[in-house]
Image (cartoon, rainbow, N blue to C red):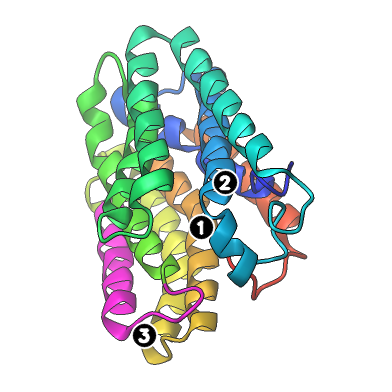
Amino acid sequence: MLELVRAPAALTVLGDTMVGATGARGVVGVRGIPLSVSSAFLYSAGMALNDYADADLDAIERPERPIPSGRIPRDMALGIAASLTAAGVVLAFTAGRASGLVSLALSASVWTYDLFAKSTPAGPALMALCRGLDVMMGAAGPGWRGGVLPAGLIAAHTAALTALSQGEVHGTNRATAGAAAAVTTVTAVLVPATAPAGGSAAAMVGAAGYAAATLPAQLDTVRTPDAGAARTATRQGIRAMIPLQIALVARTGSAWATGLLVGVGLVGRALTRDRAKGDVT
């Protein structure tokens, strides 16, 4: 089941609600733990639902995945997705009514993306909405407007990443890869440019780390937009979520949350170190 839900990748969403909370109120607060776990549950639900929806296609293109390989029945994957969604929503409501309501919108967006929109032109935009709502789940409540900009930056990164991921099997094109590189560049500039005075230096360091984590692979894909380059850029873009979260939290001057996300990044790097570089995300 851990492979079905891409367990190591769930680490990349733990910081979303921290980004929202620190953007809105400057601190994570006691709601931080249930909201981060809620994000992980909803992300994992999306991964299970993705494989449920793609079972027939995966039987041709990705036969090693849990469902086409016969290790997990397709109906079980749907049940896992539904259970994780319910658990994520319940946890969000324990953190507050506003966060719970956002989790309902997030859940609806995840299910719509996986079941209907993923392979359509609307796919990247809807996936971006999912990540933006995940950030806003942490920002919900007093000061929520402060979470809008960081939510937008994470959503923009997500849209670029999702567009690139559509070329993982058959290749992408230079325009898509170039647009992704442009989004990364603009995001890396905006993070420190919009930081309060107390967090500007840390935001600059964080933004540089984010750009270094994802931009080289995107530029490689501009030069050679084949499937292998698209897979590498997609994988790097997923991993770069944590450096982006670190930069956005550092931007607010929250040293505790920044240090915690640095630790999450180190754990994620250790867990994914031996993962194959060429497989489809």
- Picture quadrant where residue 251 is located: top left
- Disc 3 marks a residue whose amino acid type is Val
Circle number at residue 52: 2
Question: Looking at the rendered structure, which numbered label has been put on residue 222?
Answer: 3
Q: Identify the amino acid type marked 1.
A: Ile
The magenta stretch spans which residues? Answer: 167-192
Q: Would residue 277 be visible to someone looking at this image? A: yes
State the residue in front, 132 or 210: 132
Residue nearer the viewer, 99 or 111: 111
Position of residue 202 measured from the top left corner of the image (x, y, whole percent): 42, 48
Query: Is 248 located above or below residue 235 in the figure?
Result: above
Q: Quadrant of the C terminus?
A: bottom right
Q: Position of residue 136 (x, y in %)?
A: 32, 29
Q: Which residue is drawn at 46% across and 68% down?
A: 214
Q: Position of residue 68 (x, y in %)?
A: 69, 58
Query: Looking at numbered disc 2 in the image, what kind of residue is underneath it?
Result: Tyr
Q: Which residue is drawn at 29% across and 78% down?
A: 178
Q: Count numbered badges in the picture.
A: 3
Q: Do the residues labelled 1 and 3 touch (CB within 8 Å)?
A: no
Q: Residue at x 26, y 45 (%)?
A: 152
- Name the residue carrying label 1: 238
Q: Which label sits on residue 122?
A: none
Q: In this view, does 267 lie to the left or right of 189?
A: right
